[in-house]
Amino acid sequence: MCPTWPGDDAALALIEAGYQRLRDRLNMERLHEVGRALASEQDLDKLLELILVQARQLLAAEAGSLYLVVGAGSSKELLFAHTQNAKVNLPYHRYKMPISKHSMAGFAAITGECLNIADVYQIPEEAPYQFNDSFDRQARYHTISMLVVPLQDTEGEVLGVLQLINRVDDDQDGQPVVPFLAEHQSLAESLAGQAGVAVKNANLRGEIERLLEGFVNASVLAIEQRDPVTRGHSSRVAVLTVGLAEAINATPNGPYGNVFFNEGQLREIRYASLLHDFGKVGVREQVLVKSKKLEPAKLEIILQRVRQRQAEQVLQTLRQDWEAGCCFDPERWHQIAVAQEQETQRLVAMIIQSNEPTVLTQDLADGLGTLAGLRYTHWNGQPDTILDAADLSCLSIRRGSLSDAERQEIESHVTHTFRFLQQIPWTRDLVGVPDIAFAHHERLNGRGYPRHLADSEIPVQSKAMAITDVFDALTAQDRPYKAAVPLNKSLSILEEEGKSGNLDAELLKLFVVAKVFERTVNGS
């Protein structure tokens, strides 16, 4: 028997049903694609643009706008965050407005309901909301159909409002702008759900980033309060190191031509640079801020002993004359007093000059040897040395103000930094912060500290920071214990460090050619 064919109406219904199923499947596939696209974008501004692009494509909308709910509690507002229009291209600015049922976006934000309006100029007067035609008048645009959909997260909280304007159907004759159908509303609501989750995730990420930024800034403040003489150093090193990393990105040739730091890695470099000296909080304050070889209180005690020795020497001569039966001679006593004062002034000047962190000359070193035997009378009546072995050792430091033990204590700040940064649960794109900071005092020739790493073991980011750290230490204007080294001389010193194998010569060349130093120092 021949099969029976349905009548024309039944056949048409079957075809339409099949067509509808096909459209539903295609729409679901497109929604999945949109969801994947939204999930991969983490920047909120780019995400808002992507939401509008995808929504307009999916629903054939000529234009669209996005509002975000900002603030909390009774202070919540709607932020006009983004807009697109295929027909007119006018500049727009972000602005905030109260959340009110009188506006279409406000109504959707308050009620969580979707508005599907065929003609916005035909909204009944009794409706709680009305259409604001100010944009139409300004841009000479004509809004007709509009779909207003709240963006909600999985808990039903409204995070924003999506407005799609003027659905376009090119198959229509004369009037291509048509209403949004029920199926379009369903699609928009599905997309809005995905967009709401994406916006929530982007907001959470933004909150995490702001939290990290605040934590890092607070840590830098703690460093600078602990070591005021280096205030601004961490921030300047961060600016310079990121600048050098950007110079690497802009140089496709050479040894680092295949190295490129993305936005997340540049942020990682910035945080590592800002926190590279945080371990100084674990160094004793008297060592950390030590600008001279002796502590001020100890220097004052030693100088008092020298003065006491002067008086004791005069008194001893007076006693000897008295025991020998000599008559008092004012001229002789004046000469003795002048001689003792001159000797005291010589000793004081020698001690004060030796106490400076400059290079110790051989004459001063030889003079310090004569101080070892100088004695005075202690308050307990017993003779004692003016300078004990530890004081004499400090004054004999050949360069700088730190003894070997104190220098090792200062150098331990790198290890303190690493141990501190290791305790922080860094996000995946910042996980390298501890290692970058840990190696900023390592040197290519293995003479750095604390691990004496070889060239191949030092991260590129740390090599870059090593250059900027030394440069800023040389050019810093605010160090009370040394004058700032002029720019040209500082660059020459860096060049010598590169030739000696301490610093990376290729990165140093980029630092100079790209004039990265001008970010913190006037290049004139």
Image (cartoon, rainbow, N blue to C red):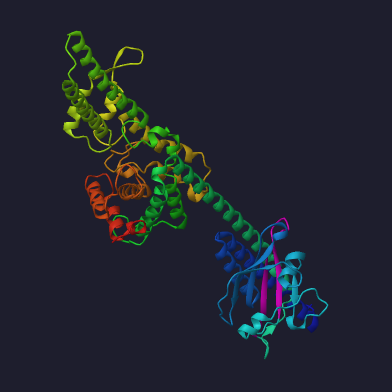
Task: Give whichever of 315, 376 is nearer the camera.
Answer: 315
- Taking depth in this image into account, of 64 and 344 the one nearest to the observer is 344
The percent coordinates of residue 381 (x first, y second) are 33, 12
* Image quadrant where residue 329 sits: top left
Of the 4 image quadrants, the one containing the C terminus is bottom left
Q: At which x and y percent is residue 198?
A: 62, 60
Q: Which residues are magenta?
A: 145-170
Residue reaching furthest to the right: 126
Q: Nearer the viewer, residue 467 or 444?
A: 467
Is residue 493 rendered to the left or right of residue 222?
left
Residue 236 point in image, percent of width and height: 39, 52
Figure disc tally: 0
Quarter placement of the N terminus: bottom right
* Dominant secondary-structure state across the stretch colored magenta: strand
Residue 167 appears in the figure: no
Q: Is residue 419 visible?
A: yes
Q: Within the image, what quadrant is residue 446 found in?
A: top left
Determine which quarter of the picture holds residue 27.
Answer: bottom right
* Vertical placement of residue 196 versus 297, above or below: below
473 displayed left or right of 398? right
